[in-house]
């Protein structure tokens, strides 16, 4: 898709990746519908970008919030949706509050699924339309300390796959991109320390934003970011015990950075 002149909804638009993604799409000539739940942050982003963009201040984890977004999109029409909003919490599963697990699943999985259902009738009116779901490498590699997050992102990956097949005879393409660790405020300090201890590489948010735009421009159906993480995805799909042994061998290090290890 050539994004010039296209109307594109971005959820989580004011986050570390979202802001840079908004800048890239703005520079490419897109008309953006910028969404998050913080009105002040949205206004600041719109002022920074300049141009004519639309704000959709709403909590996508709620029915009311999704209705606000869908009504705005219905009014102006949209060509693409980028489901970027998400949250992450690193801790042992047994130590996470049930309310936190519900929030992770609600924002990372339930919200984009239901938002897509709301927006599909609008998207199908376009001669060309895109839904791009931003997942995670962890959707394909079950990682200790990130059980709830992995679960939510794995659901989003499967949702993308199933919906893309269901919509194969329509004008709507459904894409998926899976970043590895990214240097944003989404990661708490202990996650950054864990990545250093494990020798995990991280990407800068500008790189991830660039790859998201590239996926839209090329209609790339699925895109994994990072090496050797791409290899781990393949190995885990074919011989999961190999990746499993590697992660279990690092379990003591992983636990050291959770609340249980403090």
Image: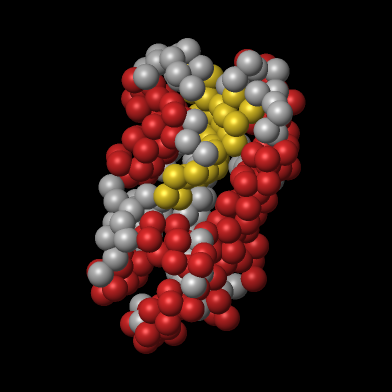
**Residue positioned 53% across, 19% down in the render:** 7
- Indicate left or right for 60 with 198 as reference: right
Q: Is residue 73 left or right of residue 6?
A: right
**Which residue shows up at 49% across the image and 44% down it?**
222
Q: Is residue 150 above or below residue 135?
A: below
On screen, residue 94 above or below 66: below
Q: Residue at coordinates 64% horizontally, 71% vertically from top-left?
A: 98
Q: x, y (%) of residue 73?
A: 64, 23
Q: Is residue 26 visible?
A: yes
Q: Residue 225 placed where, x, y %?
A: 37, 50
Q: Is residue 81 left or right of residue 15?
A: right
Q: Quadrant of residue 100?
A: bottom right
Question: Which residue is found at the position 26% from the left and 74% from the top?
Answer: 197
Work out which quarter of the rendered image holds the C terminus and state it: bottom left
Q: On the rendered structure, is 121 left or right of 142?
A: right
- Note whether 69 is above or below 38 in the view shown: above
For this rendering, which residue is in front, 134 or 92? 134
- Which residue is most to the front? 238
Residue 188 locus on image (x, y percent): 37, 63
For the rendered model, the colour scheme is secondary structure
Residue 44 appears in the rendering: no
Indicate whether 118 appears above or below 194: above
Pinpoint residue 213: horizontal percent, then vertical percent.
40, 31
Q: Nearer the viewer, residue 261 or 149?
A: 149
Q: Nearer the viewer, residue 13 or 132?
A: 132
């Amino acid at each position: 898709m050539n994004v010039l002149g296209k109307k594109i909804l971005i959820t989580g638009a004011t986050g570390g990746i979202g802001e840079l993604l908004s800048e890239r799409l703005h520079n490419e000539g897109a008309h953006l519908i910028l969404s998050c739940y913080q009105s002040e942050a949205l206004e600041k982003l719109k002022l920074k970008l300049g141009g004519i963009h639309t704000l959709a201040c709403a909590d996508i984890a709620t029915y009311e919030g999704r209705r606000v977004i869908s009504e705005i999109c219905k009014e102006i029409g949209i060509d693409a949706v980028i489901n970027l909003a998400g949250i992450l919490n690193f801790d042992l599963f047994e130590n996470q509050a049930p309310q936190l697990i519900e929030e992770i699943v609600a924002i990372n999985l339930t919200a984009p699924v239901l938002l897509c259902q709301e927006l599909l009738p609008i998207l199908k009116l376009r001669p060309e339309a895109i839904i791009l779901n931003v997942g995670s490498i962890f959707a394909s590699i079950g990682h200790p300390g990130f059980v709830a997050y992995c679960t939510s992102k794995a659901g989003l990956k499967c949702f993308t796959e199933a919906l893309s097949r269901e919509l194969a005879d329509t004008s709507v393409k459904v894409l998926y991109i899976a970043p590895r660790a990214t240097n944003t405020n989404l990661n708490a300090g202990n996650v950054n320390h864990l990545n250093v201890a494990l020798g995990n590489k991280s990407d800068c948010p500008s790189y991830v934003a660039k790859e998201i735009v590239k996926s839209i421009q090329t209609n790339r159906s699925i895109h994994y970011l990072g090496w050797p993480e791409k290899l781990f995805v393949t190995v885990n799909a074919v011989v999961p015990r190999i990746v499993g042994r590697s992660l279990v061998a690092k379990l003591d290090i992983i636990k050291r950075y959770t609340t249980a290890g403090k």
